[in-house]
């Protein structure tokens, strides 16, 4: 398996890889998430992300086929009256094609994010996940992540 950094010409590829995870979210929360209508639905978003110097995207490939991607953002917040300054790598998105799941693709992508964080001297990696996504929660915990914050919602 090959992991490479995404480049500006990868927007359509990333958009097509994003269909799987976007569809999953739209199925569970159709009032929040839009169902993608085609593979190019997120091209403008990925164009923007690939141009952002605080965003790093990696693509996992094998035998010329893209298997998944991870989108990481460098987050830096100044100290305020309530919190100390913080600097962390946020895993904003990770998606692996359904046929490639269980083969270590996600783990390799997560390890790549860890490598980047270490290279940038970033002390923490964070991510969030929707409550329905229990398979992802198990995976994140296997990768060494622990729960530290809970969000609650009450629909009226």
Image (tube, rainbow, N blue to C red):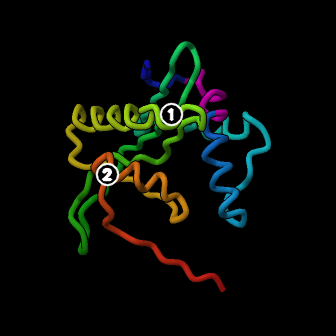
- At horizontal 32% and vertical 34% (from top left) the residue drawn is 111
- At horizontal 33% and vertical 48% (from top left) the residue drawn is 142
Instruction: Give the image location of residue 3, x and y in percent.
Output: 42, 22
Image: 155 above or below 30: below
Q: Which residue is mark 1?
A: 69
Q: Is residue 59 magenta?
A: no
Residue 15 seen in the current view:
yes
Q: What secondary structure is the magenta-colored segment mainly?
A: helix
Q: Earlier in the sequence, mark 2 or mark 1?
A: 1
Q: Nearer the viewer, residue 98 or 148?
A: 98
Instruction: Give the image location of residue 130, x and y in percent.
Output: 52, 61
* Part of the protein shown in magenta: 8-16
Tell me which corner region of the image, top left, top right, bottom left or bottom right, holds residue 117.
Answer: top left
Residue sitting at the far right: 37
Distance of label 2 from label 1 (alpha carbons): 23 Å
Crowd around label 1: few <14 · some 14–19 · many ≥20 (10 Å): many
Residue 47 seen in the current view:
no
Q: Nearer the viewer, residue 103 or 152?
A: 103
Tell me which corner region of the image, top left, top right, bottom left or bottom right, holds residue 99.
Answer: top right
């Amino acid at each position: 398996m090959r992991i490479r950094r995404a480049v500006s010409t990868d927007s359509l590829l990333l958009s097509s890889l994003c269909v799987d995870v976007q569809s999953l979210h739209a199925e569970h929360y159709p009032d929040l998430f839009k169902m993608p209508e085609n593979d190019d639905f997120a091209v403008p978003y990925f164009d923007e992300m690939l141009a952002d110097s605080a965003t790093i995207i990696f693509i996992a490939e094998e035998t010329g086929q893209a298997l998944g991607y991870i989108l990481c953002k460098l987050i830096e917040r100044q100290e305020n009256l309530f919190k100390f300054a913080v600097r962390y790598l946020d895993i904003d998105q990770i998606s692996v094609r359904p046929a490639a799941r269980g083969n270590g693709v996600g783990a390799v992508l997560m390890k790549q994010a860890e490598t980047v964080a270490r290279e940038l001297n970033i002390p923490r990696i964070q991510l969030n996940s929707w409550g329905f996504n229990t398979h992802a929660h198990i995976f994140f915990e296997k990768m060494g992540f622990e729960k530290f914050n809970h969000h609650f919602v009450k629909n009226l």
